[in-house]
Amino acid sequence: MKKVFAIEEFCLACHLCEYNCAFSHSGMKDMVKAYKSGFQPARIQVEESGEINFALNCRHCSDPVCMKACITGSISRGEDGVIRVDTNKCVGCWTCVMTCPYGAVVRGRGDRKVALKCDLCTESGNTPACVEGCPNRALVFEERGDD
Amino acid sequence: MGINYIQPGFIVLRDQNRCIRCRVCERQCSNEVHRYDEDDNIMLADESGCVDCQRCVSLCPTHALAITENPNHLRQNANWSNQLIYENYRQAESGGMLLSAMGNPLPFPVYWDKILLNASQVTNPSIDPLREPMETRVSLGSKPKRLEIENGILKTKLPVNLQLNVPIMFSAMSYGSISKNAHESLARAATELGTYYNTGEGGLHEDFYKYGSNTIVQVASGRFGVHSGYLMAGSAIEIKMGQGAKPGIGGHLPSGKVKEDVSRTRMIPMGSDAISPAPHHDIYSIEDLRQLVYSLKEATRYTKPVFVKIAAVHNVAAIASGIARSGADVIVIDGFRGGTGAAPTRIRDNVGIPIELALAAVDQRLRDEGIRNDVSVVVAGSIRCASDAVKAIALGADACYIGTAALLALGCHLCRDCHSGKCNWGIATQRPELVKRLNPEIGYKRLVNLVSAWDHEIKEMMGGMGINAIDSLRGNRLMLRGVGINEKELQILGIKHAGE
């Protein structure tokens, strides 16, 4: 399946992917308005250490530990291979947050205390917002065979 | 620090209603203009380092930013401009020469903008390049005076020529003055376009030997990175005698830019200043130049055409005539508006002559002396668009070099701060965290787009004139008319005034 991959060599650590992710999942049409109504945390994070930086999001593992660990069965794999959280079922126990080896599951804020993770922007049907908005093509959305 | 004489040139206008505190501006500014205030959850700015490179504006996701001139002005004075006053303050403080980058920004006449092109009407048909073949290929180098053909077979041995698919090449910009990613973009674009890029005097990085069939290697007064492998690697060799932005002086790559890779490529110690002398110490006459031309030809077994590049200066026609007789295959003339990574301000802004006049004078002189076919003429020094290129070719050029326009395609915003080494666009810098901002994959494609777009426009303009091959446009000054220029200028340009 197609996934988001980071190209460390060209990541500027500008963090725009995070903002584009949060905006795209806000369901709002204007970024400023979305920010003012309270962004949920981005489902992609830029990891930085010295000169090395890259953006990391869910790897949609073939054997996802988050899914196994989920106490309510709210994490599932769709037919398209994408791992999603059913936020109606999620109770916010954060077991998935603790088990994910990549730190790719994040905690929702405010009245949505549920686990949030990358869904590859499948709801919008577009290229993932992080990839689309990356100013230096340091994120690519492509098929690279099984992991 | 006592009195602050020098005020920031620009100010940051931030629409706080639009700002989402994403801090992209702060992270992207190598001049540390923007900062985030946690106490008040607000973005602030200190403009003293701002160079108006527009990086923050271009990356701001909510268009909350604008950079504008500082409205603070010294008292108006038509003789003493604000800039002159500030420059004097700066020198009173530093005691040093002023440095500047990119081309001459002063309002000297741009003759391209005073020349108009012809088009066919009624009595001669124009040509539609979308429907009919149109030739913009150029071959650079010496052409034989006559061809001998025996029994239908060509007997004359043809001199080595470079074949260009488009009459545009990328001018010399050294690895050191610009980044490795910028060089890679230029090299890959030249390869895809079927044209050439020029190494500049910084040698050729080992990773780029594979682009040799689209590379012109430069030999300049510092001889940086020159060895037999380097000379053989390219398709042609360019001897740099002068540069339009700084005629009469050498170059200076500050030690800060001489990092490991640059040092290895240039064959100089790491962290040392790379100083190119003003003259070539072995060239004091045309005869000396001839020796170098033939040394290089000998060293490359006569397989590479040799270019000689000079700055456009007062006696350019006579100098070009000498170069044509030195055995060079191509003369490159660089006009006074040509770019640079760093030049003394006074030299950049006051030395040299416009490329339009230099080109017209050189082409005429070579034709008068019957030696025009011995050399090709390439012009550089602010060819800004396809119509500049068409006018240059009609004035007598074989092809054009573009430097600044190519950098614009790579993201340059002409902030003219190259000499600081802190280029926010990853072009004129060697700092790894800045270099990575220029992704060659994106850069080379943008260069290919730019030159392809120009090529379409050149064909369109040629078609309008009823010309279907660039060879028929070359030196065709009847296609040009001057507007708003005096008799002397028309005479030097060799063109008639509009209406004549």
Image (cartoon, rainbow, N blue to C red):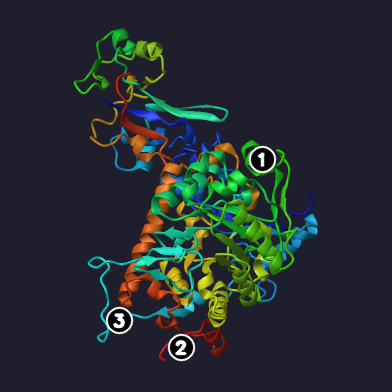
Which residue is tagged 3? B120
Q: Amino acid at mark 2?
A: His
**Gap in Å between the C-alphas at discs 1 and 3?**
55 Å
Q: Residue furthest left?
A: A79
Q: Amino acid at mark 3?
A: Ser
Q: Earlier in the sequence, mark 2 or mark 1?
A: 1
Against B472, residue A15 (above or below) is above
**Residue B86 location (% of width, % of height):** 70, 62
**What residue sits 61% from the left and 74% below the top?**
B321
**What residue sits 48% from the left and 75% below the top?**
B396
Against B351, residue B230 (above or below) is above
Q: Residue furthest bottom?
A: B500
Residue B213: assigned label: none
Is the Cβ of the residue at disc 2 closer than 8 Å to that at disc 1? no
Q: Earlier in the sequence, mark 3 or mark 2?
A: 3
Q: Earlier in the sequence, mark 1 or mark 3?
A: 3
Q: Are marks 2 and 1 on the same chain?
A: yes
**Residue A21 location (% of width, % of height):** 36, 33
Which residue is tagged 1? B263
Provide the chain ID for the residue under circle 1. Answer: B
Q: Which quarter of the figure has residue A55?
A: top left
Between B468 and B157, the one lying in front of the other is B157
**Gap in Å between the C-alphas at discs 3 and 2?**
18 Å
**Gap in Å between the C-alphas at discs 2 and 1?**
53 Å
Provide the chain ID for the residue under circle 2. Answer: B
Which residue is tagged 2? B497
Against B393, residue B433 (above or below) is above
Q: Secondary structure at mark 2?
A: strand
Q: Secondary structure at mark 3?
A: loop
Question: Dot 2, how many residues are within 10 Å of its Cα: few (below 14), some (14-19), or many (20+)?
Answer: some
